[in-house]
Amino acid sequence: MSEEKTIAEIGFDLDRSDGVRRVEGRVRFFGDRIELSQDGETSVIPAGDISEYRLTRGVGSVMLEAVQNGEYILICRATMEYAEILGICQKRMNAYLRGSAPKKEWLSRSAGVCPKCHRPLPPGSSRCPRCAPKKQYLRRLWKMAKPYRGLIYASVLIYFMVAGLNMLAPYVNRILVDDYIKAETLPVFSQYVIVVAMLLLVQLASRLLTMLRSYLQAVSANKVIVMMRSVTFEKVERMSLSKVSKRTSGELMNRITHDTADIQQFISSETGTAIENILMLAGISVLLFTYDWRLALMVLMPAPLVILSQRLMWNFLRSRYGRQWTLGARSNTVLHDIFSGIRVVKAFGMEKAEHKRYDDVIYAESRTQADNETLFAVISPVTSFLMGLGEFFLLYFVGNRILDGTMTLGEMQQFSSYVAMIYGPLRWMSGLPRRLSRTMTAVAKVFDVIDEENDVTDKADAVDTDARGVIDIENVSFGYESSSEVLKNINLSIKPGEMIGIVGRSGVGKSTLINLIMRLYDPDDGVIKLDGVDLRDIKQESLRHNMGVVLQETMLFGGTLYQNIAYAKPDASPEEVINAAKLAGVHKFAVRLPDGYDTVIGEKGYTLSGGERQRVAIARALLHDPRILILDEATSSLDTETEKDIQDALQKLIAGRTTIAIAHRLSTLRNATRLVVLDRGTVAEVGTHSELMKKKGLYYELVMAQRQMSKMTKESA
Amino acid sequence: MEITTDKNDKAENGEKITGLFEAAGVVYLDFGNCRFVKHGDFLGAEISVGEAKSYGRVWLHRSFPYELPENYISVQDADGEEIGLIRSLDSYGEEQKALIGAELARKYYTPKIERILSLKETHGTSFWKCLTDAGELSFTLQDTSRSISKVGGDAAVITDMFGNRYRIASLKGLDKKSMRKLEIYL
């Protein structure tokens, strides 16, 4: 038996019938049967009559099912950890049933599993949260900073100098006190001036160097972060649509702006302080211990106590401050909610209720804040007192020494200056873990994006295309989520110059098919070819260059009308733009605007109506002059009259170009060479309008339903 | 949440206007017109709304999975069309209830957290170990505070990085130690 090849093998973890029982199971698929083993017991399901595999998503669980002789049978059940891999298995088995060759990655048993800890990976990510190499992040950050290391080294050098100068000051001070102020013989006045001048010089040099250092640091942090932002942004832009849509745009914005800002903050202030404090700590400790190790020990005795108490305090406060932070974030969210929905709030007269909602969160926030501050006010004097204990010890012992005559007043001053200086770094160090952890969170999040594996990539040997416009869709299956197939085994061949209309009910996979043709996603199974070349072998830039797209949702960018039309062809001449605009029906309203084509549109500028926006989008696609034109509900937001105008204009343009159009309004597609009717992810009918009408199938039904509808609206009008 | 019942809206001058309930035309099911049977590995139903019909497999969906798990259960056919809505399971006997309950338990795998044994957070990702009604479970949340949501007044739902759900039936009922771990994310 063992040499017989399994088609797929996967694990599952929930009992088939008992809702909550966890089990350890494996299921193996063979050509003629399915072998199940659950907690050591095995059973066999004959697989001969299975026509399809399905994955049913429950809540917190998924079920892999099969359709056998029209009836459903349950194969196995698992928690969501297995959802992705069960989806892959389902696709593989369906591909097997269709007789297509399995893709290589389906064969690997480790798909979707962390190679290190063998736990399933989070959906859509290649980074295991448990095993992510966090410690390497700092090293990688350092690597990214390579071009600016000169700057960084320079600022470190300055740190050494400043620390040295800072430590010199108490020494000069001692000379001042012992040799001049308290001197037994009358000091030489000129020498006295020199010492005072030295003190001044030390101070001045230290300040100047600090200024220079801050400048260098700000510059280097800035440069590193600008680079990091740019790298992250580029990464996000290059990510395939499926990866991008798994994250919200807010989250991605946060990665690029917020998290990188956290890192910048850390580089520009924290690293500097770190170097400074560590240098001070080391330097002063050496000085103190060489001077008198017993005294030094005495002074430093409370230090561990201080650090410990600060840690304890932080642990205690952390959860409270965390809560304050969460509440603060919530009050922002509520505010954002209310303002962005202000029309609804007013329309339903809910101002008072919303006011109360906002009041509730800000009161909760202010209560926590007040509590925290009170607590902090009580705790911090205590730690300060503890920290000051060392000075009392010092006072006692040093006082004795001075009375003994074994220590001079100047020496005492020098010593206590050092002691005062050493407590700063100590206090700072106790807070370091907290700050470091915050930065590491940001670093981890940014690298999470940078490390994301791109699934729609250009092959190394990808070719340029100068498309003639032959599109072949062969056995294509695809699903956005691994569990549900939106398109199943689609076959379609489009000749150059053809206009293909894609029709079907909502959610039937029309836009999905177009997304695949544009290669915003790669099909799970099968191939799409342009002029006989697999899309995956064509450079994406070259592919998109040959396609002009008008989508249902029109995206206008901040800029002038001219810039928006020339978006995909920035070097377009004004005349080209006017011609494209004329064809799309933009010209008519554009020239009437006081600022003409120079009118600023987009978020901050002039507001165009829905129809006008749509026309701008069409003009943009026309200017692009593509071989393949894709219209996804391009004219749906226009009234029938305007649509007709644009349709006529488009008709001139469509001639000779391969056009693929989706429209709900079937009259839009009356000029199509062929209509493709999709139903439940498969091609149900293909033919011309009259052929399909004669057939009296699905298309006929759709047309009839729409006629009925328009008749009704006409009658009522 | 309360269970509402049918009522007709009346205009002020006494003229009857079509009420919301009448207009929506929700079909309600109970033991009188809907009985469940075993259908292979799944659940089938005999439903007589208008005319008696024996459905093959039917799909159950809770309308309020956390707040009213036993009420407003939608019964759907293979096309995802709603056959009817079970307002309450009260009209069903033990045996039928067990059938329905088993099917629901299979779809809704949402272990109830009884105690949080440990909760560690590093870099925004948190690792949990909890005692639940399905035994001791460990799970990971990728964006901790966004993965925990309060439902209704006193319940909470935690969604882990895979989409598994864990319930906390009552926040007030949670022991102090667990609450202290959870609190900062609420």
Image (tube, helix red, strand yellow):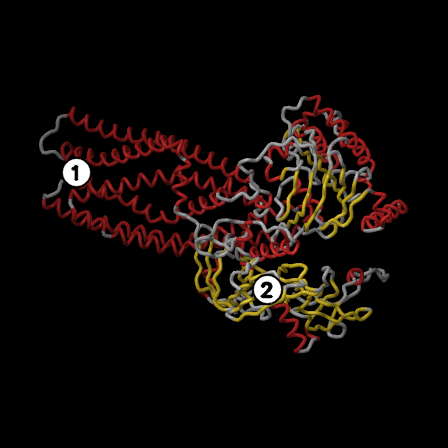
Q: Name the residue under label 2.
A: A34
Quadrant where the N terminus of chain B is found in the figure: bottom right
Q: Which of marks 1 and 2 precedes in the sequence?
A: 2
Crowdedness near tag 1: few (<14), some (14–19) or many (≥20) residues, C-alpha within 10 Å? many
In this rendering, the label closer to the viewer, 2 or 1: 2
* Residue B66 in sight: no
On residue A164, the disc is: none
Q: In this view, does A143 lie above or below B26?
A: above
Q: In this view, does B83 lie above or below A297?
A: below
User: How far from the left and from the top, in percent, is residue A692?
Assistant: 83, 46
User: How far from the left and from the top, in percent, is residue B20?
Assistant: 78, 60
Callout 2: SS: strand
Q: Mark 1 lies on which chain?
A: A
Side of A141 relative to A677 (left or right): left
The residue nearer to you, when weighing A661 against A312, is A661
Q: Is residue B59 above or below residue A184?
A: below
The residue nearer to you, when weighing B171 against B73, is B73
Side of A541 relative to A365 (left or right): right
Residue A16: image quadrant is bottom right
Residue that lies at the very extreme toward the bottom in this rendered image: B94
Identify which amino acid the numbered label 2 is placed on.
Ile
The residue nearer to you, when weighing A589 against A620, is A620
Residue that lies at the very extreme toward the right in this rendered image: A715
Identify which amino acid the numbered label 1 is placed on.
Gly
User: How far from the left and from the top, in percent, is residue A507?
Assistant: 71, 50
Q: Is residue A570 above or below residue B95?
A: above
The residue nearer to you, when weighing A402 against B167, is B167
* Residue A174 in sight: yes
Q: Name the residue under label 1.
A: A410
